[in-house]
Image: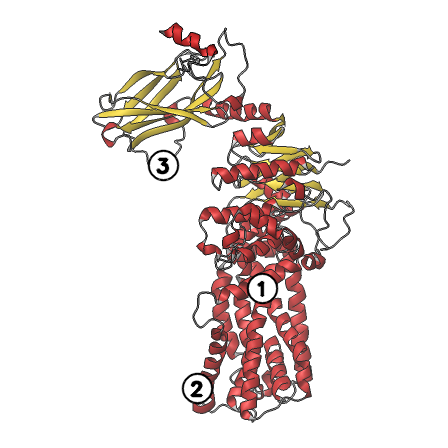
Amino acid sequence: MPPAIRVENLSKHYRLGETHARSVRDLVNTAASRLFGRGSHSEQKNGAATGGTLPEKNASDFWALKDVSFEVQPGEVVGIIGRNGAGKSTLLKILSQIVAPTTGRIELHGRVASLLEVGTGFHPELTGRENVYLNGTILGMTKAQVRRRFDEIVAFADVDTFIDTPVKRYSSGMTVRLAFAVAAYLESEILVIDEVLAVGDVEFQRKCLGRMQSVSASGRTVLFVSHNMPSVRALTSRSIVLSHGKTLYNGLTPEAIDRYVDENAITRSQFTSVADLDRPFEGLSGELRFESLEMESTSPQTEGATVVFRMGVRNHRMVGDFVVGLTIFRHDESPVGSVFSGAVSAPMVNECVEYGFRLPTQQLAPGRYRCAISLADARSQGRRLLDSLSEVLPFEIEPGPLQSLDWPAIWGPLRFPEMQPIPVATDNDPRQSHLLTATK
Amino acid sequence: MSTAELSPLPINPNVAHAPSTPSPVITVIEPPRGWLRLNLGEVWRYRDLLFLLIWRDLSARYRQSVVGFGWAFIKPIVSVLTFDVVFGRMAKLESDGFPYPLFALAALIPWTYFSSTLSSVSSSVVGASGMLTKVYFPRLILPLASLGAGLADLAIQLAILAGMMAWFGYAPGWTLLLLPLLVLYTVAVSLAFGLWLTALNVRYRDVGHAVPFVLQTWMWLSPIVYSSSMVPDNWRPLYALNPLVGVIEGFRWCLLGAIPPNAVSFVSSLVMMLVILVGGLIFFRRQEATFADII
């Protein structure tokens, strides 16, 4: 049986600046050089179109994908993970035939339905019923196929009383439900899904995941792109990690997630000083800034131990107190919890002071964790942010000597203190009467 | 509810009621190459989408409007009356012996179709950028849908003309039988120019600004308010290169029984149109692979 998807040496090249309309002078130059069969413009342009050699040194050249190859067997559910800009979306767009590859080749055995967005082509003035037909045919179904599935789609979306109301009167949740329902009933052997589950309420997300699992159980091939590591873990057995347009890893999902997390850690540690790290968002006042940030110990900590970190903070022009806020994340990026400090007095202006804090890690289950940390003005009740860093302070918790049991991820990130039996006053239950007497 | 209904056998996407023998569809994705990749069969496979897009344009157009479809009547009637007052009564332009409103409307029908679809066609791909970057379908569907939606207005205007002809006591002759061919010709002319403008508009948004201005000039270069018999003879060969001349003369002849279009100039219009249309199709299909990259 041939693989459902075979990707061979796929590359996609962009010339930055060409995304916008080129100038008329450029156009005339290209036309002239084409006419006379020479000139750098025509060479670059034709090179891009026919897969010839391309000048790689040019700063405006950008390879969104470079020599990516992989195969997916029929019935497999494969995750595609990677940072923003790693090439995930480009790969999906080429697989969906939205953009053409620069070089390489893809063979798809079976019909492909790709879902890069829910509700493509929805028109707000049209009713739910009309939009179901429209959206279905946009996604490649015929009208007859939509008609056959119509009742199931409406039932799945749970909007039957509003099916003849214009979609502009729908709540956003209803619109998303209806849109996803259409996609869920596409008839195809290969399903390519981008991060579309990030929309919709939790209940509906669960329903969609269930539906997708039943899709793959029926022998369909699914390619699933997500930033949400827990859902990649839940849905896929194999994953491909992309990094800077290349395949970093192709194998079992747990290992792939580790590689993805490690890759992030490596790119982070390349920076010599946290002062130069990219901030996760704009609008930080910068009156106080992190100067250094490190764990006291880099070796794994035993479960139940506390973890100490040190942070150097430089005062640029702030007067008064600040508070520290810290969120702990599991290595699949699900948040565990947050902690805040009390008011701390800031260093003198232009001075740097090192502070040490103890993290509340006593209840953390074995696993790998990272933190996001922020400094806020104490007078603003923590609302006015001075500086912030994410994906810092990695640490690992090991099982203690008495707890040799593995801790699977689905048990959650916390081990609560051991449960203690409490006395229950039930006279006619002989099994519990001894508890009563014991506590009396 | 969901698993039980999943069909275990693949259903052929191309035929609605195909036998469900599992003959796998094989798609090969490669860099675009070659000159002639028209692949019009693919457009035919997506005809359901074409009709639904036409229908979406039409049915969404007049929603939440009090006058509704009345607008499709009001607009042509008001412009014909304006033309009658300004050019027929004040400027007293020659109208080949027909009442001026009939003379003007017979020309306005193809012209309105051409000018309004040219605007909507040239913005059809850019306007659908949301769809374009998320779903694959033959991009040719988008300009075709705009052309199809314009036909509804054309039909309404023909009905208005029929009413006016009855009012003025004119009956159409046998030439009316040629109407479908002339409508097809008008659609082809609009598509020919539309394809070039659509593909260019994706890369150079200047097109969107140029189209209204070009159309304004074009209108005066076409025999709409005046009769083409007013054009000096030595200018006629050049004048006839405008495909709209053949279209409009054809409509007047077919609907009102006016003098038939000059055979030579009609054929030169036709050849001109075919060259632009075939060139436009090739250009569009070559460009569409890059639409999503540069839109």
Relative vertical location of residue B200 with respect to residue B157 in this rendering, above or below: above
Is residue A4 shown left or right of residue B121?
Answer: right
Name which residue lies at 58% across and 36% down.
Answer: A210
Q: Position of residue A134 (x, y in %)?
A: 58, 56
Kindly report the distance in space between the C-alpha atoms of the residues bearing marks 3 and 2.
Answer: 61 Å
Labels 2 and 1 in the same subunit: yes
Name the residue tied to disc 3. A282
Mark 2 in CB contact with mark 1 (< 8 angstroms): no
Residue A79 location, quadrant: top right
Q: Position of residue A258 (x, y in %)?
A: 55, 23
Name which residue lies at 22% across and 30% down.
Answer: A379
Q: Nearer the viewer, residue A376 or A410?
A: A410
Labels 3 and 1 in the same subunit: no
The label shown at residue A9 is none
Q: Position of residue A107 (x, y in %)?
A: 71, 41
Instruction: Tell me if residue B24 can be seen.
Output: yes
Name which residue lies at 78% across and 47% down.
Answer: B21
Name the residue tied to disc 1. B54
Question: Crowdedness of circle 3 by 10 Å Cα count: few (<14), some, many (20+)?
Answer: few
Mark 3 in CB contact with mark 1 (< 8 angstroms): no
- Residue sitting at the far front: A428
Is label 1 in a helix, a strand or a loop? helix
The label shown at residue B86 is 2
Amino acid carrying mark 3 in the image: Glu
Amino acid carrying mark 1 in the image: Ile
